[in-house]
Image: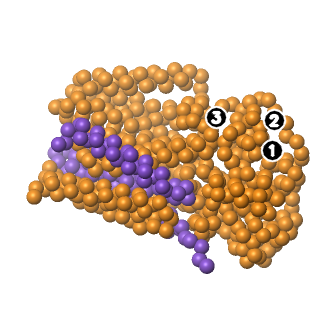
Amino acid sequence: MTTELITQLGYVLAAGLFIFGLKMLGSPATARRGNMISAIGMLVAIVAALLDQGIVDFTYIAAGMVVGGAIGAIAARAVAMTSMPEMVALFNGLGGAASLLVGWAALSPDSATFTLVTIVLSILIGGVTLTGSLVAYGKLSETIGSGAITFSGQQIVNSLVVLGIFGGAVMFCMNPTDPNWLYMVIGLALLFGIMAVIPIGGADMPVVISLLNSYSGLAACAAGFAINNNALIVAGSLVGASGIILTQIMCKAMNRSLSNVLFSGFASVSSEETVVEGEIKPISVEDAYYVLEAATNVAIIPGYGMAVAQAQHVVKELTELLENNGCEVNFGIHPVAGRMPGHMNVLLAEADVPYDQLLEMDEINPRMETVDVAIVIGANDVVNPAAREVESSPIYGMPVINVADARTVFVLKRSMASGFAGIENPLFYKENTRMLFGDAKESIGGLVREFS
Amino acid sequence: MSGAEYLLFILMLSIFLGFELINKVPATLHTPLMSGANAISGITVVGAVALAGTGSETMAMWLGVGAVTLASINVVGGYMVTDRMLGFFKKKED
């Protein structure tokens, strides 16, 4: 048996392990083992790759792996769960950068045209992923403003960049020995990544990171074509497919098309005032306690505000007290609550809330009529009844959690400012809604103290 | 057998397989799915080692070394943080 054959068989085994690992992610009970199996697959693939006869010097490989591995390990241990979106954004960017470098390094004077095309693709997708992810990281960690950045003539600039990339790519494929065309494509790809993400606002970040996740896979895939490697193609396309599915789910949950998210920013809020009837009815912590004390079925709807206030642990405490009081407690989680898909679930899981208590929107909505108290913590647009009732609302048609169907709704809110999208929320004026103003962590803490 | 059409064939099958697999992942696991997918996209390290190990000290080698380093961050960091997150998910004990 030749070493080449052993390497190829190693890749086959690795691909099988990746697939099996992803399959086990289908249930929270087996997911951790699935991740382990996927990691073993990666180890097999790396060992198989190291058997390559062309490798004569392992010094730099070892150095790169040790340095990279150490940075990765430290980051993985140190990151707070509230910062997961930034971390994933950053990792997406690194993946894109690695594929860019591999594509670039694969260039040789005698490359065939097909290879040249795939080299350009891996550089292009990798470059866009790198800078796009860095901008997304900046927005998510609020090192740069999280709002949409738009300027007049943006469309024209973007079109010129795309034309430049296309022209540069064609010229490069025709004159692969002239590095200037290559540098032009790299530079413009990096620029395009920035231009593509700056006009997208904070509320749309779940879509953007899902999409960049997909790109990091597609970049690996393109690099796989450039260096003729099956393992990269299989693994890259699995990641690409995963990101695309998540992107679709996020878009559907916002009732917007992908092109609408990417190209329009959030459409400026229509100036016609929605007529909101009723009045705001505040409630004190003490009165809220009396209502909760009598409740037998409570639903909690968390949003990004819960993460900002770091209220998840005290929410878990309240949940336990309610349960000891003979009350059923469930969480209703909207797909776009938080800044990335599944963000709320991880935060609540970290606070020891069992995953069978975390219900998806489609599960909680039919039950809402039997709920005594729905507690909305730091969520706004995802519970906005205007999405169902007000046809002129910019979010009309977006699926929302129907908290207004519950007997009583408590909305925990810092002040009366509107949500990310800047849309008036008629929920606050409903007959059965009570506003509990103040910091979410302190309000819930107050309720916990009343109970104990 | 490693012509372009053969690679494209693999690409098509993997994309379909990916769609089938990921559609079955519940919403509650979407964050670990993303970070786990991130780790898998570090597969680029497999391609990068061959470029980094030529011992030639050319530009291609240095690009390969850079790719090995970046992809290793992805692989190690991605799998470890995913494991850490999945450790939080517990079923309700009765």
Residue in view at x 50 percent, y 23 percent: A157
- Using residue A422 as the reference point, say whether residue B64 is left or right of it: left
Q: Are marks 3 and 2 on the same chain?
A: yes
Mark number for residue A266? 3
Q: Chain of mark 3?
A: A
- Count of numbered marks: 3
Q: Secondary structure at mark 1?
A: helix
Residue in view at x 81 percent, y 33 percent: A273
Q: Are marks 1 and 3 on the same chain?
A: yes
Question: Which of the marked residues, 1 or 3, is nearer the chain's N terminus?
Answer: 3
Residue in view at x 34 percent, y 24 percent: A168
Quadrant (top left/top right/bottom left/bottom right) for the C terminus of chain B: bottom right
Q: Which chain is orange in the rendering?
A: A
Residue under label 1: A426
User: Residue A200 location in percent, x, y?
Assistant: 57, 36
User: Residue A64 location in percent, x, y?
Assistant: 29, 54
User: Residue A260 location in percent, x, y?
Assistant: 58, 33
Gap between marks 3 and 2, in whole Å?
Answer: 18 Å
Q: Chain of mark 1?
A: A
- Using residue A269 as the reference point, say whether residue A265 is left or right of it: left
Q: Which chain is purple in the rendering?
A: B
